[in-house]
Amino acid sequence: METARLLIRRGTAAEPPRHEAFEVPFEPGQSVLDALRRIRAEQDPTLAVRYACLNANACKECMMLLDGAVVYACTARLEPREMRLDPLPNKRLLRDLATVIAPPDERLE
Amino acid sequence: MPAAPIQMETDILVIGAGGAGLYAAIEAARQGEGQGEGQGEGLGEGQGAARVLLLDRSLIGRGGATVMAQMTVAAAVAPDDDWRRHLHDTLAAGRGLCDPRLAALLCREGPECILEMDRWRVGWAREGDGLRQVQAPGHDRPRCVYVDFLSTGPAVSRTLRTQAQRHKAIRRLGDVVVTDLVLQDGPEGRTVTGAVGFDMTTGAPLAIAAAATILATGGLTRLYRRNSASSNMGGDGYALALRAGAALLDMEFVQFFPIGHLAPRLVGMDPIMWDPFRYKLGGRLLNGAMEEFIDRYGAEDGGRYRATRDLATYAITREVAAGRGSPHGGAWLSFTHIPEAELRAAFGPVIDRLAGNGIDLTRDAVEVAPIAHYHMGGVRVDTDMETGVPGLLAAGEVVGGANGANRLSGNAITEALAFGRAAGRTAARRVAAGVAPRLDPAAAAAALALAGAGGPEPAAGAAPNMAALVARLQAAMSDHVGPFRTADGLARAAGALAAIRAEAGALPPGRPRPHDLARLDWFDLRQMLLVAETVVLAAAARTESRGAHQREDFPDTDPGWTLNQIVRLDGGALRLDRAPVLAEAA
């Protein structure tokens, strides 16, 4: 079976940048978010990613960089190749792919 | 040791920022402003407006089920319609189990909310001088307003958020997870005096003092593998209410939306998207042999969209069980007989989004199957949205009773708006009557200790994979507590839940830190397990089939079971009681 290799930025802003590779079986039609959720359930539950609406592109939380371009992980198709995922560069990094995206007046700090 | 918890104070705490929570916050804030409509800028500078803190565990107005709504919102707003006709249809769909007071509130006050939303420029589709309304299954006439194209939910959420932003009394706060309510003795008896949880961005525990707390957390669809709501809806409001001493009603009634998208795989589309297609275009529902079949189960379909959700779910599931399903285990939905121009006129840009997914509706049928969509059961309240526990209210899907054993299409958003408004009104009245926030730190201590607790480290492999445990819970519920239930299956589900509970452990993994999903999954599992247990308990006890609760071992509806079931937490154990259905309001 073909696999997709996801190279994912890990850690918090306080840690030196590093990328970790995960391999998942490639199934045609899947989204990048499907692969990230599968990695959490099968390989590493600590992988941090934001999403609420599950592939409907309604919550708009799963925005990230795929090979350097901004995408929604729920509409980006998984491909049987190496795909590099990074958090949004212009937002404060929380952990891994999760950043602070709430408007300033809807945050605690 | 974790840092000192964050302490906050408000008059009215609203947990959940979907339709119900947003409307509750707006209504509560404007009660003290002395104006019903509020067209000015920067409202709430006058005296008397209660402080409102509106929380969401993700983003304000983006999570929950409201934003996912594709189309229909039912309300008797047409000149020749009457809310009593809507009530008649709601009670009939509820199969004898509706709380008629709550159903009447939904149908009577719904139109006021819909028209207020119109003044707030939500963008309801129009026809002549009025609002365009479509016919939905179970309604006696076209009664459902909507926003094109498939945009009802985002439009409702955006409109309410914009209104909430205009009230200075409302503080909106995302990324806060509530784990427990705080209870303490007071002049009214055991009273909810606030909530405890943690800030997702840092992991820091927090305690919030409030004179009134409104649960607007939505339903429990996340208990199921295939669901149409958001990953935030694991039933946490039910668990919070139970632990606070409130009663849950009719937890066995989970609505499965019959024609959720099954195959081919779509990205960026809501699985209930075929609902609006059927409203506008009809479409044909076919079994694996390409035969129409709904009429074999006592309803008519015939290219129209008339069969109620419980019946259509039953019919599709039966066809699949009889070996007459589509290749992926559902039914075919076909629009191939409809000319492309008509498809485009009805759905414009959506046709292009489908093309991007490789689907040409003039050529391809799609596969659909039942998908967990809504929960009829929930927190028992009165028409003021009071739970009976002083200081605790509920609004929206988390409330049980208005929809009985089966919800009528289009009632969910109406329920969110009307019940949110009622809850906001009641909470403001409580504050105006002089109830002030007074949280005793000792009463919050145990919950705060848990929110800040350290447990085994998941990275070291010392903790089980909580995401995998969530998936196991979803599998057990889907396989055994779906549209069809048996005593054996329900017992297996109960066993699976007990095993998952034991594996999850008594402490959250890791320690408080930024955006820790393994830790969040543990707190979610804690609530999901309790809520799933209430569904299994009530489903096992109801030895009949009615509406969304179908027992293969008790296939008939038993008039003797025209009863509500009430679940409470009593000394740490779930207790199930029966109660007569309330008589219809005079």
Image: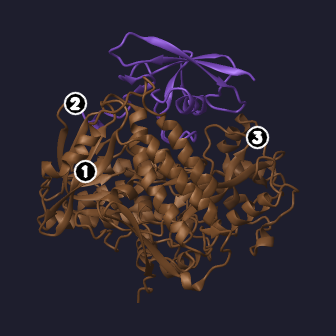
- Badge number at residue B475: none
Q: Residue beneath label 3, please? A: B359
Q: Residue at x 17, y 57 (%)?
A: B49
Quarter of the figure with the C terminus of chain B: bottom left
Quick one: label 2 or label 3, which is nearer the N terminus? 2
Mark toward the viewer: 1 or 3: 1
Badge 1: few (under 14), some or many (20 or more) residues near its Cα, within 10 Å? many
Q: Residue at x 81, y 59 (%)?
A: B286
Q: Residue beneath label 2, please? A: B2
Kindly state the secondary structure of the residue where label 3 is placed: loop
Q: Residue beneath label 1, please? A: B195
Note whether residue B114 is visible: no
Colour of the chain lettered A: purple
Please give the chain letter of the residue carrying mark 1: B
Cβ atoms at labels 1 and 3 below 8 Å apart? no
Tell me if residue B360 comes above or below residue B221 in the rendering.
above
Colour of the chain lettered B: brown
Whether marks 2 and 3 lie on the same chain? yes
Q: Position of residue B526 (x, y in %)?
A: 40, 47
Mark toward the viewer: 2 or 3: 2
